Image (cartoon, rainbow, N blue to C red):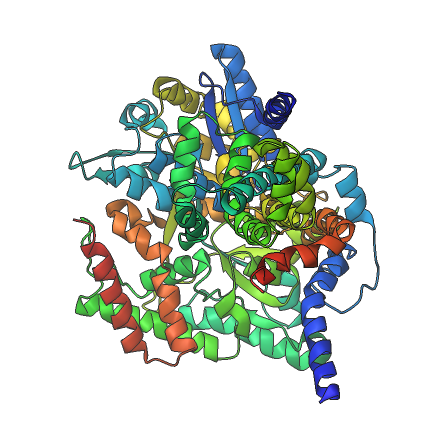
Amino acid sequence: MKTFISVVAVVILVWTFFPVYYMVLLSFTPTNDLFQPGLYVEHPTLRNYVYTMGQDNPFVRYFWTQLGTSLIVSVWTMVGVGAVAALGSFAMARMKFRFRGYVSGMTLFTYVIPSSFLAIPFFKMMGDYDLIDTKLALVLAMITFASPYALWVLSDYARSLPPEIEEAGALDGAGTLQTFFHLYLPLIVPPLIAIGTYAFLYAWNEYLYALLLLTGERNIPLPVAMSNFLTTDNAPWNLLMAVSTVYSIPPVVLYYCFKRYLVSGLVSGAVSGS
Amino acid sequence: MRLWMCLVLLITVLMTPVAPALAADKLVVWWNKGYYPEEDAAMQKIVKDFEAKHKVEVDLSFTAQEDLVKKETAALIAGRGGDVMFCFYNDWQIVPKFGWDDKLADMSDVIKTLEPRYNKKMLEVAYVMNNRLKKRAYYGVPIEAQTMHIHYWRDLLKEAGLEDDPAKIPMKWDDYWGHWKKAQDALRKKDAAKYGKLYGVGMTESTRATDTLYNFEMALLSYNGELLDKNGKIVAGDPKNREAIIKTLKWFSDLFTSGYVPPDATNWTDGDNNAGFHSKSIVMTPNPSQSIPAAQFFNKEDPQKDNYFNKMGTIEWPDGPDGKKARYLSAVKTIVVPKYSKHQPLAKEFIKFVLEPERFMEYIKAANGRWFPAFTDLAHDPFWRTGHKGPRGEKDNHIPVATTIFLERDNKVFEHYKHPAYSVVYDENLWGKAMARIAIEKWTVEKATDEAIERMKAIFAQYK
C-alpha cells in the first residue's frame, strides 16, 4: 500500500511539475531548436532572459512597465480585499444589525454568476464613471470578485474568537473602532495574510478584465501583453517562456514569505464550528 | 479622530496610483497589432502626421486580433470605447453582426470618396444589412486582403527527385495532390530516420482553426458547390450543392485517412501548419496569407534569405476535378467606426488620411506583402508584380503569385457580407466540426453533411 501511494505521489508530482519544467526548459532553448522537442536543452542559452531584462525585443519593449502594472494592481487589490474583508468580517461576526445572517449568506452567492458574464456590464459601468483605461478600474473589479471569498473565510474565523475579548476592551473604555484596530485586527493577522495572498494571486493572474479595461502597451499588465507574442505566425515561444518564468517569480516569493500563515490562515474558517 | 484621519489617508493613498482617467477629447484608435514591428512603426508615423496636420490628439493602441475582437465586442455592446477600430477579424466577426444591429457608423460617404480607387470585388465585404433600417449600406472601409496560396519546400521536392519548378508542377486535381504524396513516399523511402515523421500535405482540418474554413470553401468551389445564393439565402441543401459538400468532405476525409496528412492536423490552430512548415515536417501547406514566406524573409538565422528565394515555392490552388481553373476566395480586412463615437467626422477624416495612396502604400509594404491592397492604384505598384529582389539577384517566388491570384483569377470575397448568420457559421466552425465527425467520430459523410446543413439553417432562422 505504501509503495502504491508513493508511486501515485510521484506520478502526481511529475504531472504537476512537468509543465513548469517545460516552461523553464523552453526559456533556455535557442530558436533553431524550438521544434525539436526534448527533455533537456542541447544548446542552452540565456539570450531570452537578456532580451527580456534589457527590453531588447519588440515583444518585451515595455516589460518592466507591464510588470509594474501587474504589481501595482495586485498590491492594491490585496490591500483593498484585506480592508473589505477585515471590516466586513468584523461587522458580520462581531456586531449585531438587522439582516446580518442574510448579508453573510449573500456574500458567496455572488459566485453563482461567473465573472466573465459580468465583464460587459462592468465595462459599461466603468465607462460611466470614466474609469476605463485606469488601473483603478481593474483594481475595483478585482476587489469585487476576490472579496466575497475573503469575507467568508475571515467571518468564519472571526466567529471563532471568544467574545470576552471585546468585553475586556469595553471594560477599558474601547469604542467600536478602537476594538477593531487594537483588539480585533491583531488577532486576524494570519487569515488576513492568507486572503491577502489569495487576492494578490487573483489579480496577478487576471486576464479578461485586464484586457477589457486597459488599453495600450504601456498600460496593460504582463498577462495581456504576453498574448501579443502569439500575434505572429512564428510565435517566439522561448521568449514567451522566459517572460512567463520571470512572471512566476513574485508569487513564489510571496508564497515563501507568508508560507507559515497560508495553511493555518486558509483553513481557519473551516474549523470554526468545532 | 486620529483613526478617521488614518482612514482618510489610506483611501487617499489607495487612489494615488490609479487616478488618471480617459481623456474625452482624444480620437481613440484601436488598431490590430502588426505581424511585424515595421507595421506598427508605420502606423505610429501616420498618427503623428495626422496629429500635426489636424492639431488633434490621437490615442493609438495596438492589440492582438484575438483580444481586440473581444474589446470591440464589449465596446459596441456597452456603447463606449475606441472611435476607430481596425481588427483583422472585423470583416467576419464585427461588420455583418454589428452592422445588422445598427451599432456601426454608416461609412458610405467615405466609400463614395474612395470608390474610384477601389478594386470593386473587394468593396462588397462591407456592404451589409442594417436590420433596424432594413437596408444595406457600407458599415466598414475595406483596406487590404488575403487569399489562398500553397507553399512548398522546393529543396524537399528536389531531394525526392520530383519536379520543383512551380510552372512544371502538375495542376490537374489528382496529379497535383498526388505530387506531394509522392514526395512523402520518396523521402521516407530514401531516409526513414530523417523523414519518418514527414508528411506530404499540411492540410488543416480542425475545429479550432479558421484555416479549415478557408480550405473547405476553396475545395467546395473546386467541386462547384455553393452555400448561399446572391441574396444570402441558404442553398446548401439543394441537391447539387449537397452533393458538392459531400464530395468535398469525403475528399478531406480520404486525404486525412490516407496517411499523407499529419495525424494532429484535426487539432491544429491557425499557426500550426506554419510551424510544421518551418520545421520541415510537411512538404506543402495551403495558407490563406503570405505569412509563411514573410516569416522566412525575416528569418534572422538565414541572413542570405536562401529559404525565401531558393528553397521555398508558392503555387496556386489546382484546377478543379472538372478541369476548370481554380476559383478563389479573398478575406478583405476592414476598418469600422462605432455608431456611439462622438468623433465620427474626425474618425472618417483619419481613415481617409491613412488611406491616402503614398501613406497607405508605406504601411502595407511594411507587412512585407502579407496583405494585398484593396485599391487598384496601389495594386499597380511594381512591388506586387516583382516582389523582393534576392541578395544574389534572385526573383521573388511568392508575392507575384498572390498578385496573379488577386488580379487575374476568378476571385470573390467571403460571403458573410450577404447575411450576418453566416459569420456565426464561421464562429461555430461548422465545416471543421463536420470533418471531425467523419475523421474522428466515424460518421458517414452524408450524415455529417446533413447535420451541418441543418445547423446552418437553424442559425439563419435566428435572424429575422
Residue A130, given in percent of the width and then of the height, sits at 45, 25
- Quadrant position of the N terminus of chain A in the picture: bottom right
Q: Residue at x 18, y 48 (%)?
A: B231
**B457 lies left or right of B413:** left
Nearest to the observer: residue A167 or residue A49: A167
Residue B128, given in percent of the width and then of the height, sits at 25, 39
Q: Residue at x 55, y 62 (%)?
A: A273
**B38 lies left or right of B243:** right
Q: Residue at x 29, y 49 (%)?
A: B415
Nearest to the observer: residue B463 or residue B12: B12
Q: Is residue B369 visible?
A: no
User: Which quadrant would residue A156 be assigned to in this image?
Assistant: bottom right
Question: Is B186 drawn above or below residue A216 in the view shown?
Answer: below
Q: Is residue B181 visible?
A: yes
Residue B114, given in percent of the width and then of the height, sits at 34, 25
**B241 lies left or right of B63:** left
The residue positioned farthest toward the front in the image shown:
A171
The number of numbered badges drawn on the structure is: 0
- Quadrant position of the C terminus of chain A in the picture: bottom right
Nearest to the observer: residue A149 or residue B215: A149
Nearest to the observer: residue B213 or residue B220: B213
User: Which quadrant would residue B15 be assigned to in this image?
Assistant: top right
The residue positioned farthest toward the bottom in the image shown:
A1
